[in-house]
Image (spheres, coloured by chain):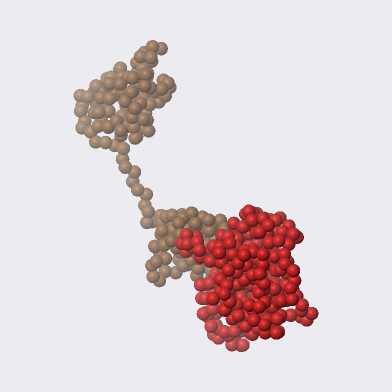
Chain colours: A brown, B red
Amino acid sequence: MENLKYNYYDILEVSHHCPQHEVTGAYERAKATYSGENPAIYTIFTEEEARELLKLVEEAYLVLGNKTLRSLYDEKLSQAGIKLGDLSYESLKLQSQITLPEKPKPSTKIEYRLDEKFEDDIKNQDDWNGDFIKKVREYKKIPLERMSEITKISAYYINAIEKNDGGSLPAPVFVRGYVGQVAKVLGLDEKKVCDSYMKGFKATLGK
Amino acid sequence: MSQLWVVGAGKGGIGKTFVSSSLGITLSKLNFKVLIVDFDMSGANLHTTFGLKLSDKNLRMFFDDGRPMEELIQATEIPKVSYLQGFWDSWAPSDVSIEDTQKIVAACRKLNYDYVLFDLGAGPLLSYLELFTQADEKILISDSEPTSVEKTYRFLESFICYKLRESSTTESYQKLQATLRAYRSSDHKGYFSFRSYLKESVGFSFDYFEQLNQRPVRLLVNSCRCRQDQDLGHSIKSVCHKYYDLRLDYVGAIDFDNAVWQSVKSREPMLIEKPFTPLAGQFLSVCKQLTNTNSTANLYRAAV
């Protein structure tokens, strides 16, 4: 296709350094120009030609409208001897997947020293209150802030749970959810911990 | 030495005279001394928009009797705006030869004005095209109707061809015309780019296209009634870029306003009779862009 001698910037009529929002503006303008019955293309482009141009405009925006693909395209453009035909949307998309492998997520596991005696204590614990949850958390070397980050529960509530401070906590239904989350992170039996904790929690509220 | 601005259009009745008189008045508000020349071959009517009576001093005396231009210039009621009346006593078909056009351009450049505005008639007459090539600013008016957009393209085509004819051999010019005709009649697929055609073919001087990129034709869309009409200028610009590979500069849109026809009826310039319409601001921004008094706007334009 002879039109590939133009690059995407020429098609959208923007400069190579223009900010992203201008690309979008230019795309919207070009789309309005070459689709529908715009009087500006009258007697210059046939309907078929306009449709072809519109296709090019859409393809140009697929690349330039996407920051990753745009920077990849810029990089390729500056290389000598590259043919514009090799820089279609499809090929760029493929290349972007090659150059950008998925980053491994930072693991949530934190190293702690196994203490067999304490492990036994955890197994045999029947009365789960805040103090013991705090002990387990400290044993597993998870700071309060980290716990809050993992569970997305405010550190203020986690602190209140550990202090058995019913006055600072919301309605029981929420507290149960919070405790369940914390127990899950600590690798405990969620149901057992929740049931036990909520019994004590409701007792402090006098219900 | 005065700057020459030429206001032309492909189609009649879309407000060339209104735009040129308004640009003149706006320039005078920016403290420039302005002369407006009525160069409409089909009959003068600039004096009507200014509410002035026909006078026997007119352009014909400059051409036929060789009277100096200074004697023919008349004042208007607006300070710093003068005007030169066009033909009205021509009982013969009138066209001005290219030599005469060059004569009036030279005379106008010598005058002690900041800006000389030429109000042309409709269509690509030879003398209009010659003025267009000589001008410092080429202002092309269109409105949003397909008829006038179509004629705007025809005007641009004849302007470019006129210019090319001067700097080409007869043979290569005929070849160009044949190619253009083939594209028009859809024998050829694809787009006709003047730029690549001229690069590839021999017998043309290519410099003028580069000059046109430096000082592009300015496009003004008159009587816009909606957002789509305002955006039409961008579309025309884009089409010119894609089809002819020609750079146009879209200087702005002028809104439709009932005040315009009302002021024509009352024979007083609209910007004087109703100075607080949005149109006044639109003309001001166009003039500021073109006179470079607004440096921030120019910086912005340069960045874009």
How many callouts does the rendering have?
Answer: 0
Q: Is residue A60 visible?
A: yes
* Nearer to me, B297 or A15: B297
* Nearer to me, A95 or A51: A51
Picture residue at 53% right of the left edge, 56% below the top:
A25
Horizontal side, residue A116 vs residue A35: left or right: left
Picture residue at 58% right of the left edge, 64% below the top:
B27
Quarter of the view holding residue A149: top left
Position of the N terminus of chain B by quadrant: bottom right
Q: Is residue B12 visible?
A: no
Tell me where residue A65 appears, x and y as whole percent: 48, 55
Tell me where residue B174 appears, x and y as whole percent: 63, 84
Tell me where residue A37 appears, x and y as whole percent: 66, 59
Residue A69 drawn above or below residue A202:
below
Residue B245 drawn above or below residue A176:
below
Picture residue at 31% right of the left edge, 37% below the top:
A108
Tell me where residue A1 appears, x and y as whole percent: 54, 69
* Nearer to me, B244 or B260: B260
Horizontal side, residue B58 vs residue B288: left or right: right
Picture residue at 54% right of the left edge, 85% below the top:
B202
